[in-house]
Image (cartoon, rainbow, N blue to C red):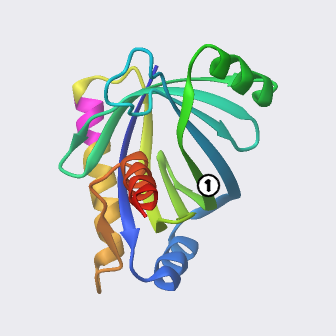
Amino acid sequence: MVKEIEIKGRIHNYKAVQDLLTERYRFIRNYHKQDFYYTLPSIQKDLKPVLRLRHDESWIITKKSMELIDGMEVNDEWEFEVSPGETFQVVIERLGFQVCCQNEKKGSEYQDGDITFEFSEITGLGYFLEVEILLNDPDTAACSKAEQLIREAFLSFNTYSELVTIEPEYYTDMLLEKKKLINQL
């Protein structure tokens, strides 16, 4: 299990945020991630996602225990690689899991020490900045320090003007709400 601590922000000035990332941090890679969020209707009442299958450079299945505290996500994550991903999709769908929403995320990853910055376009939702640290079996002090570092890094993007604001909703909640609105049309 890994502890993921992150702040996600909606970007208001795409070019300025991209320039700051390029000036301040080490470029890691460009990415194109496709996420499939699964629910298990036979045992769930709320039909919120319980698993994520991500296709990036490989196929990764993720189970998260998620908590949102003052705009900061504090998640326990269990992940493992599956191959081939398409076969895994067939297997879990035959077990009763259903895709409740999908997400396409294109962007760039940067790093500064333990802090990872993801500058992403989420199809249908807009541009976002994620600032995160992953910790292996952390104690309370390590979590507190990570939260402080993340907040400071995030706030540094707003030194001169408000380039990024904290997005208090999970991507899945925004995607499900958008899907609900589309279905009402």
Does residue 91 belong to the magenta stretch? Answer: no
Disc count in the image? 1
- Of residue 42 and residue 168, the one placed in the foreground of this image is 42
Position in image of residue 175 (x %, y %): 44, 53
- Of residue 6 and residue 103, the one placed in the foreground of this image is 103
Q: Mark 1 points at which residue?
A: 104
Q: Is residue 72 above or below residue 31?
A: above
- The amino acid beneath tag 1 is Glu
- Of residue 106 and residue 158, the one placed in the foreground of this image is 106
Quick check: 52 left or right of 168? right
- Of residue 136 and residue 129, the one placed in the foreground of this image is 129
Which quadrant would residue 69 be assigned to in this image? top left
Please provide the residue range marked out in magenta: 141-145
Tag 1: Cα neighbours inside 10 Å, few (<14), some, or many (≥20)? some
Residue at 35% x, 24% y is: 138
For label 1, the SS is: strand
Quick check: 45 left or right of 58? left
Position in image of residue 3 (x %, y %): 39, 29
Q: Is residue 6 above or below residue 137?
A: below
Q: Quadrant of the C terminus?
A: bottom left
Residue at 60% x, 43% y is: 35
Identity of the residue furthest to the left in this view: 70
Q: In this view, does 157 lie above or below 136?
A: below
Residue at 39% x, 20% y is: 137
Position in image of residue 168 (x %, y %): 26, 55
Q: In this view, does 156 lie above or below 58?
A: below
Residue at 45% x, 61% y is: 182
Position in image of residue 118 (x %, y %): 53, 58
Which quadrant would residue 11 be assigned to in this image? bottom left
Identity of the residue furthest to the front in this view: 185
